[in-house]
Amino acid sequence: MVENFVGSWKMITSENFDEYMKALGVGFATRQVGNRTKPNLIVGVDGDGWICMKTQSAFKNTEIKFRLNEAFEETTADDRKTTTIVTLENGKLVQKQSWDGKETAIEREMIDGKLIATCKMGNVVAVRTYEREKTR
């Protein structure tokens, strides 16, 4: 099922992301840059069950490697140090990050050939939509 997410994705829309970043505690300057950035997401899987997710933008590049259902340490694009676990639930890749007694979830799912990332922090929800990059 993870194979559906494999590939290179370009963000085409972002809704309510500033409010989401505020809920995370991201400072004003970083939010300004984050709101202007349209990152690419690259998802890969190797033969040993490791999943790699790279986020690339003019602002910052991040990469996480993980196995489903196994907690790992992550440093986010806004420099939070989190304990993260990614699960597969009803066809969605669900990434839960926890730090300092707080928790956020990013749910990624495929809808009509697009990758939809729904970011939730408390009652704040942001939705970022990606389309598969065309191969040359």
Image (spheres, rainbow, N blue to C red):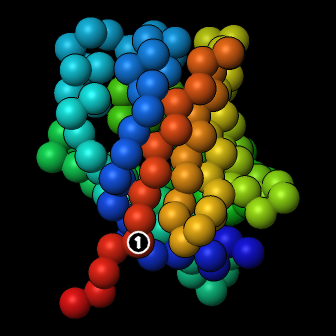
Toward the bottom, the furthest residue is 136
How busy is the neighbourhood of tag 1: few (under 14 within 10 Å), some, or many (20 plus)? some
Q: Which residue is drawn at 28% across and 29% down?
A: 35
In the image, 44: left or right of 95?
left
Which residue position is annotated with label 1? Answer: 132
**In the depicted view, which residue is nearer to us: 16 or 121?**
16
Q: Residue at x 44, y 33 (%)?
A: 15
Rendering coords of residue 130 (x, y %): 43, 57
Rendering coords of residue 102 (x, y %): 66, 15
Amino acid residing under circle 1: Arg
Toward the front, the furthest residue is 112
* Quadrant hosting residue 72: top right
Quarter of the figure with the N terminus? bottom right
Rendering coords of residue 47 (x, y %): 62, 86
* Quadrant hosting residue 14: top left
Instruction: Relative to 43, say whether 47 is above or below.
Output: below
